[in-house]
Image: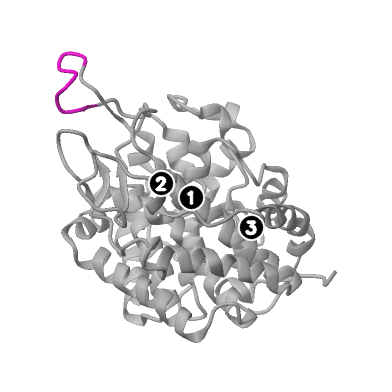
Amino acid sequence: MTFFLVMASSIAGMSVQQSPLDLSAIETQRVLSAADKYLEEEPITITRATSPRSAGGPHEYFSEGDYWWPDPKNPEGPYIQRDGMTNPENFTAHRLALIRLSVQVPALAAAYKLTGKKKYAEHAAGHLRAWFLDEKTRMLPHLKYAQAIHGKVTGRGVGIIDTLHLVELARSVPVLKPSGAISPAELQGIQEWFRQYLEWMTTHPYGIEERDAKNNHGACWVLQVAAFADLVGDQSKLEFCRTRFKELLIPNQMAENGSFPLELKRTKPYGYSLFNLEAMAGICMLLSNAKDNLWTFQLSDGRGMRKAMEFLYPYIADKSRWPYPPDVMFFEYWPVRQSSLLFAGLAFREANYLDLWKKLDPDPTNEEVVRNFPIRQPLLWVR
């Protein structure tokens, strides 16, 4: 096995310093075990399931807001909100198919990167064709009908967070390119899908609404735009995201102690805080370079990613110390192997972060946790 040394220069164009973290040794067994299983599973796209409550067609993604329930006083009327409480009867088949895609393709891409075996790339390419190219099974590049509310709206801007799971898939495509499993024409077609979706989410009213959200939704919008812009080579949108991170995300979302007050106000303060930190860590990994290191960027009062990590690290290491109310659901399933620990550990050369990352569960199975754990294959992020 080739010894895989992570270099600080791979994080943000900094001076080359080697880290003792052997990422391939840590990841190989779990990645190959998962990828070998996925070789036996065929692609499943959104055309496999439909809902009579969707205002869209069979190729248009549809989901329903999680925290919306029938009104006991008016069972046939518009749904009412119960924040933090997931309604298990809402339609989730498209979201689950998208998450399945986001789990399998990056694992197959990571397996190809580790071994060079074309079988992994070829199977990943089959998923990409089914989702983005095949006219019979493809998803259209918009989210007009995501997180609908029965009796109220056919879709919402907040639904754009559902495609957060395409971020790591976007990281997979360049990794798969050298295999030859994706033809030049197919690669162009996949990039065109993401170019069209990028245009939609940066111009449609739903996209503008999500862009301007002040909590984790705004951070996840930036992470998505950055990942998709990186895939299609849109430098202007990458620069826009860098500016937005420094001038809006950090100033508007982070308190002086490094916490995220808008997440702490929710009914799931622990899970949402971890989730928002993951989004911001992903942004820093995607957008940092030799001239603009987002990891070390800070406001005049010290707010920045170092402060955010210092705030949350003790509660990831020991959840019993969490001084805020526990999440109303799924509190017992957190934390997992948060990518923020790995990325920040490398960026700040913090051994404690790396040691904790190695100890945590890399493959959670709870659906809600998987949904809020979008970065699962660090081999696709750390060069």
Which residue occupies 38% across, 53% down? 47
In space, the residues marked 1 and 2 are separated at their CA atoms by: 6 Å
Which segment did they paint magenta? 72-80
In space, the residues marked 2 and 3 are separated at their CA atoms by: 31 Å
Q: Nearer the viewer, mark 3 or mark 1?
A: 1
Q: Which residue is mark 1?
A: 99
Give the dominant element type of the magenta stretch: helix, strand or loop: loop
The mark found on residue 380 in the picture is: none
**Which quadrant: the C terminus?**
bottom right
What amino acid type is highlighted by mark number 1?
Answer: Ile
Q: Look at the image and say whether residue 77 sits in the magenta stretch.
A: yes
Element type at mark 3:
helix
Taking 333 as reference, is 357 left or right?
A: right
**Corner quadrant of residue 236:** bottom left
Q: Which residue is mark 2?
A: 95
**Corner quadrant of residue 333:** top right
